[in-house]
Amino acid sequence: MSLDRAVLRHARERAQACAVSDPAGELTYGELDRLAMGWAGALAQRGIRKGDRVALHLPKSARALAMMQAVLRRGAVYVPIDPLLPETRVREIMRNCDPSLVVTEQVMDAMATEERHSKPVAILADDPAYILYTSGSTGTPKGICISHGNAEAFVRWVVETIRPNPADRFANHAPFHFDLSVLDIYVALHAGASVRLIPEALSYEPAGLNRFLVEQKITVWYSVPSVLQIMMADATFPAESKLALRTVFFAGEAFPIRQLRNLRERWPGTEMWNLYGPTETNVCTAYKVAEIDPGRSVPVPIGTACSGDRVWAETPSGTVAAPGEEGELIVDGPTVMLGYWGAAPHRNQPYRTGDWVQRAENGEYEFICRIDHMVKIRGYRIELGAIEAALMHHPRIEHAAVIVEGEGLEARLVAFVAGSDCPGLLEVKRLCAERLPRYMIVDRVRSMDRLPLNRNGKVDRNRLAAEAVHG
Amino acid sequence: MDELEVSAAVRQYISAEVLEGDDEGLNGQTPLLQWGILNSMEMARLLGFIDKRFQIRIGAAQVSPACFKNIDAIAAFVMSRKRRE
């Protein structure tokens, strides 16, 4: 099954049903199919063939989604590019993926007049479908190449797990260049449901997001936890009785346990899932949030393998972690990417995630930290996430991030905290001292109204580092 | 010089040099070691300050954690050393 098949099927069975909506309007399955078909024809006219890359330098919209479908129908590979990226970064991406065509709004408008039908292209599970570029903080961007089969393995798992139906309404919060959008788009299309695109301008505007959830009668939500946290902290956060919501997925970072407990209390009838996986493996483990042990002070587990994958933790001595042991999480199976574009194929090799986990007695995995977030200060190994978790115990701290400023003897742990009337340094030190070894007590505290988030909704640690130096 | 003056000077030093002014709640009983305000590096700097300000040379070997657990204890320790000299 390829990622373009579902729309063809639903265009026959429910042509009048809404497939995708954005603030400009909506496209039914019939309209989406016609647009994708017309544009696939136009792409064929421009010489786009199987395996070619087509860069989509477009803001998020229903038409952009139709263009993705058109590219897939040609057997080509779409490369969504964040329209807000600096030009130099865009040039680096273009150099790497060498697209045969760059689709901008203007190109798309011109193409609408060139509608022609094209012959269907045979697509195999191992054919590449899209390339997502990571916004790594150093070096050149890496293009993660995902096949139809990689994405389908994950989509199938979600379909089997939540049994979506045509009446479902999926919210799409993530931008198209961020892999969280794969669930919203392709699970919705698979089910003949509709995907409601949240305009980027609304992405971090809590009242607008809360209103969207209610007015659009969203039944399935997927975002990073930070977004749910800012929604919850706003006075407009809706009661469960006002919602059509049945399932909430979150991924991309750890959900602080106090906030997750709060969310569970406020929406007790909504099924919640913690999904885990680097872009290179899409989603490879999942945890259904059940009752949270009142004594639990760390985020919920990342759970067990899903999407047909196999996961294990490798200890520093190279053995598979036994229950209770820690190690690097390794993934093997159908969701593991084809490879980085322009590098040797990765296929059929297990993927090392760079994430440090603990295997629990019941077989579930607990995320501990990124291996590269394990810093050493004056010889001590420090897990920044553990400090952040300790800070979140303070009733007035809503969000916390810790970074290291300086090097060697001058290295200091700087905590950035957001919340209402955040505590000062001494109170934070007392809080740390209650829960952490002495070498993990923070040296500086900076209060902010809100922590800066990057375009993917995660805490922007680069900006915090700049703030620590210059702020 | 009495114990109160020593206490005030040490407090001022810790506030300015260690906490960089972020000293809300700092008092004579604040647990300096337990809360990680004085780590080994800060302790060495504090001994340098005491040496310079009060002309008391304290070798690292003479430092017992009990004498540096809080500002009151440091002031008492400095005064007892001063009297002995």
Image (cartoon, coloured by chain):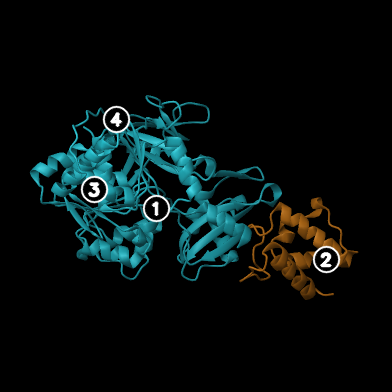
Dots 1 and 2 on the same chain:
no
The location of residue A53, given as percent across then percent down, is 35, 36
B33 sits left or right of A57 in the view: right
Disc 4 from disc 3: Cα separation: 21 Å
Figure chain in cyan: A
Q: Residue at x 67, y 61 (%)?
A: B32
Q: Which mark, by number, is residue A375?
A: none
The answer to which of A287 and A199 lies nearer the viewer is: A199
State which mark lies toward you, 1 or 3.
3
- Classify residue A287 by image quadrant: top left
The location of residue B42, given as percent across then percent down, is 72, 56
Dots 1 and 4 on the same chain:
yes
Disc 4 from disc 2: Cα separation: 86 Å
Disc 2 from disc 3: Cα separation: 89 Å
Q: Amino acid at mark 3?
A: Ala
State which mark lies toward you, 4 or 2.
4
Disc 1 from disc 2: Cα separation: 52 Å
Q: Residue at x 51, y 40 (%)?
A: A140
Q: Mark 3 belongs to which subunit?
A: A
Q: Which mark, by number, is residue A112?
A: 3
Is residue A323 positioned above or below A134 on the image?
A: above
Residue behind mark 1? A255
The answer to which of B51 and A331 lies nearer the viewer is: A331
Is residue A54 positioned above or below A227 on the image?
A: above
